[in-house]
Image (tube, rainbow, N blue to C red):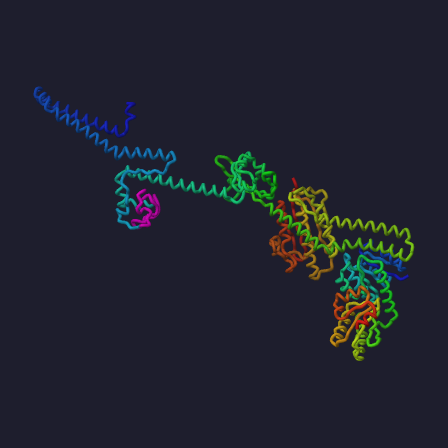
Amino acid sequence: MEGLKNISLKNKVFFSTLVVISVMSTGIAVATRWIFVSNLASEHVNHLTGKLWIPFLSIICASILIAFFISYWLSKYITRPISELTKMTDEISQGNVDIKLGFGDKIRCWEIENCKEVLCPSYQNTDLPCWYLDNTLGRGGSPGSLPEKFKACRGCAVYKKRARDEVLQLADSFNNMANSIRVYRSQLKQSKEQYQSLFNSGPKPLFVLDSETLQILDANASAEEVYGYSRKELLGKPFTDLGPFEYKEAGLSDFGQGDRHNSYGVYPRVQHYKKGNKPFYVNIHASRARFGKRDAIIVATTDITEMIEKDSQLIQASKMKTLGELSAGIAHELNQPLNAIKMGNEFVKMMIQKGRKVSEEHLRQVVNEVSGQVDRAAEIIKLLRTFGRKSGFDREKVDVNSHLKAVVAIIGLQLNLENIEAKLDMDEALPPVLAHSNRLEQVIVNLLTNARDAINQKKEAGDAAGSHVIHIRSFREDDHVAIAVSDTGVGLPRAAKDKIFEPFFTTKEAGQGMGLGLSIVYGIVKDYGGDIDVDSEEGAGATFKLTFPCAP
Amino acid sequence: MEKILVIDDEKPTLNMFRLFLGAYGYTALVAENAAAGLEVFRKEKPSIVFTDIKMPGMDGFEVLKQIKEIDPMTEVIVITGHGDNDLAIQALRLNATDFINKPIDGQTLEAALKRAKKRSQVTKSKEQEVSLRTADDVAIIDIRGNVSSLSEPFLLNAYEKICEKGSAKILLHFDYSSSINGAGIAVLIRVLSESKKRNQAVAIAGLSENFRKIFHIVGIAKLARIFDSEQDAVSSL
């Protein structure tokens, strides 16, 4: 019996047909003999048997022939298609979907239906029968795709022609399946290529990192170009070799509701290093993703070195502009010690010229005054130099109070001249904040000049008398350092409150302000993770409160 | 001893003023702010007052106004920052009689004091501030003391006389101590514009350095040439 299992279907059919026919003819023979034996004498039977020997042999031969033809027919219509289907399935499972079954008649629907729809996808198409094709135009245009269009196709002569042959239907179905796989595969390939090319030719450096080790799993061409490493050098390198990085979720993107793979992080102004340890500045955007079976982080960096340089130049320029605006105050302030020095000296000169004796007491008074006033002038110059200096690109721990003092000292010169009092109240035990000295000073300068302008506006409106005060305070608020600047100026109309931090918004007269001061303040404060708040009543002054997180 | 009041918010400056004024033989009264200064002024009635303009609280202009209200004859010399001519002109409009720039030069201070003293003598002696004389074909108007709105009729009168005589050459001769306030400047400009219309040649001489500067700023120098001495001016006409 074991041997039987290895026999092909065709041979099984052949042998079984043969066996059935043999058994049938033997049966007929035995039955005939039995009938004859019961009715006839044995001699007669023997004689008859001898005569029937030839017809029997012919019947057996005919049976073999019939069995052969049956098996041939079976093989042609059943076993060959099945083995071709088997071959096709094997090919598909090996990944080759570019094969077609080539047996059975091709369906030529346009000939059957005498159809002239040249634009129909089925027209002169013998690859697939029309009912497998979407949006065919024949028979009043059977729309849609399977299974909806089947309703229309069931009654069609084209379909009926094929419906009689289940094996061909199976083959058609297989062809359609292979075709669908082929289509999906090419779509998949195309989409993969699309994403690959998006990744590769993205204008920003992109990295795929292992979420555990932060090793670089993949990097694009821009990453090679910007960082100066080849892709080979980058792969396997820890991303932290390029600059500090620690994935912290800033939030969840709206894409996947609550899916942790859609969280992202943003890290502004990070110092990174190109090959050869050349530093530059980047903004980093990172988000979680899957890379194959691994949890990965996708990181995009943007080179902002130029922007930072420009920003720093802008801050410097704007400080210099502030100094320019303060020049009257500074000149006045420097003129005071100079005047005392000059007068002291002129007094002694005059006495000498007139041949009069200067009393020791007067002389002492003059020299002491001169010395003291020189120190005072030097102090002002020191202030100017401190205020005018540049600061580095990196955030450092900064003492808010010392900068408040410096700025108030400088701007105070001008404020004095304009009859505005600057009152400074500081919490001396303030922790430092992470910031740039220059930018922080710019923030304070902008707030103070704004307060001054608000007061001057009020003065111009006719309220010249009364006390004009800018009150500057520093204090701690939970884990934040706060700076508050209050003025007694015109205040803000309610409608302006929401807009004052927008660039180019100004309540000052045309030509008086660009409307950039507060928007610069806003940008800087937000950059440091801080916040800004304004409290004001029209006509009754305003208070701006800034908060900065304490340095860790 | 004559009393002089100095108002300035700068203590070192006040100290030095005290030394200087003492050396010149004056009694220096000092005040560190406007309110204190006005109080001293009311009490001591000094004939000469120096006041700084930029001061916290009440400023020098307010001091000037109030002093002129109390005693219009007071010589008020304002102290301005170096090159701050706008403030000087503003002060002259408010009837300041002179101004002095910080840092203050010894000689400048001495000259300012001398001029102030002379002016107050002119005022006190009721001497004629405007007088007319002729030298050859030049009509000369001598001007002393404070040229203000009070001088207007005298100046216009003198000019009318010149026109009646038909002089084509006019010299405005200022005494070195003379001071011209805002109203005085306006009258001068009126006279000079009129003379230009009448094709009269006008020259100015004898001004102190301070007012020469002011005449340039307010445009008087465009209407009449300014000379140091009377001779130079006459020979130019």
The quadrant the N terminus of chain B occupies is bottom right
Seen in the picture, residue B184 relative to A262 is either above or below; the reply is: below
Residue A133, magenta (yes or no): yes
On the image, which quarter does residue A285 sit in? top right
Q: Which of A469 and B74 is in front in this view?
A: B74
Q: Which of A467 and B167 is in front in this view?
A: B167
Q: Which range of residues does the magenta coloring cover?
A: A118-147
> Magenta segment, principal secondary structure?
loop
Q: Note whether residue B36 is visible.
A: no
Which residue corresponds to the image point at 84% horizontal and 74% vertical from the top-left?
B131
- The picture places residue A412, in percent across and down from the top left corner, at 73, 52
Q: Nearer the viewer, residue B177 or A8?
A: B177
In the picture as drawn, the residue positioned furthest to the top comes out as A43
Q: Which of A113 and A505 is in front in this view?
A: A113
In-image side of A355 versus B204 (left or right):
right
- The picture places residue B68, in percent across and down from the top left corner, at 81, 65
On the image, which quarter does residue A20 sit in? top left
- The picture places residue B50, in percent across and down from the top left corner, at 82, 61
Residue A518, magenta (yes or no): no
Count up the numbered dots.
0
